[in-house]
Image (cartoon, rainbow, N blue to C red):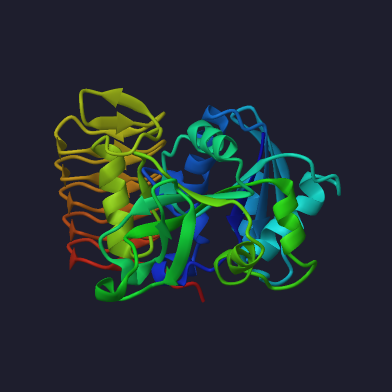
Amino acid sequence: MKAMVLAAGKGTRLFPLTGEVPKPMAPVVDTPIIHHIFDLLARHGVTEVYVNVHYLADALLDTYSEETRITGMSVHFLRERELIGTAGGVKHLAKVAFAGDYDETFVVVSGDALTDIDIRNLVAFHKEKGALATIALRRVYDTSEFGVVEVDTEGNILGFQEKPDPQEAISTLANTGIYVFEPRALSYIPEDTFFDFARDVFPRFFEEGEKFVGYQGNFYWSDIGTLEAYRQAQYDVLSGRVQVKVPGEKRGESLWVGENAQIHPSAVLEGYIVVGRDAVVGRGVVLSGDVTVGTDCWIRPGTTIKRSILLPGASVGDGAYLEDCIVGHGYDVRPGETIRGGALIRRVP
């Protein structure tokens, strides 16, 4: 089975973090979001993956290259010269994935959301319904942040609303951006044109009376649309709420330690903690709550860090205090600083 992963967008709601990395490369438990997606697809029998890239594309291509193998899958990255929408991006990828011979059911997944959806069950539901297109749906509390979908008791889609006020919403079922399509769906998308699924393609399915359904399963999904949601996704992984792989050796119930990481015997670790590969946690350091110390980070002696995420290459000076922080790639927290909340991003001249 083939899958397409959409990774071209800017992820503006996650700024300033996405000022230095594209959102799919933002690490959750020291692993890029998009790599969690790759692991998910591989677990469910996908053999070929096609990924579109545009914003800060080199960050993705420097990590993965244009063609590679990941967890047994063949993965291809294709640049978009300009953004052409979700549907336009899929059409662009399909020309390479199918080489013009559109004859295979395929899956589309957002490359900047965290999920553990069972892809096999989703595809089986799609085929059982005989649908042209299937959307994976997840119930949400605040509809103002999502496109929502109304379905009948058989799963047939009845209507859409884009980010409605909760009091006016026709549904609390959010469009997750996870789709299954029959190849004929591509005929609804013009070549080399900005085209969006929710705005342009799905209304045409209605107009033409196509079989169009929504799948509701018991799965985790977060679009990680805000810094708070980013922190929450971190906790959800470490607490076992979402079934994704945490890198490193698991020690006890709540500690994961990467290869060549060094943790001083006097360090105090309380809560769910990840210490990434080649990281150093110094003498008398306190890590409390859910904390990720990314690859190649250096936490100097006497530091206290609570409920925070340190991205790869960050360092924290002696005696500093961090609480509810996101520390960006390569950022240096000065000795003795006290910082509560926010994202600390290195300014590049």
Name the foreground residue: 137 vs 307: 137
Furthest-right residue in this view = 100
Whether 129 is drawn above or below 191: the answer is above
The residue positioned 52% from the left and 28% from the top of the image is: 43
Task: Place residue 55 in its image quadrant.
Answer: bottom right
Q: Is residue 301 visible?
A: yes
Q: Position of residue 13 (x, y in %)?
A: 41, 71
Q: Quadrant of the N terminus?
A: top right
Name the foreground residue: 151 vs 299: 151
Q: Position of residue 92 (x, y in %)?
A: 75, 59
Q: Is residue 66 visible?
A: no
The residue positioned 47% from the left and 41% from the top of the image is: 36
Numbered circles on residues, count: 0
Task: Place residue 127 in its image quadrant.
Answer: top right
User: As drawn, is 7 to the left or to the right of 329?
Assistant: right
Q: Position of residue 345 (x, y in %)?
A: 38, 67
The residue positioned 41% from the left and 37% from the top of the image is: 278
Q: Position of residue 173 (x, y in %)?
A: 36, 57
Name the foreground residue: 348 vs 34: 34
The residue positioned 33% from the left and 72% from the top of the image is: 144
Task: Place residue 257 in its image quadrant.
Answer: top left
Whether 196 is drawn above or below 93: the answer is below
User: As drawn, is 163 to the left or to the right of 132?
Assistant: left
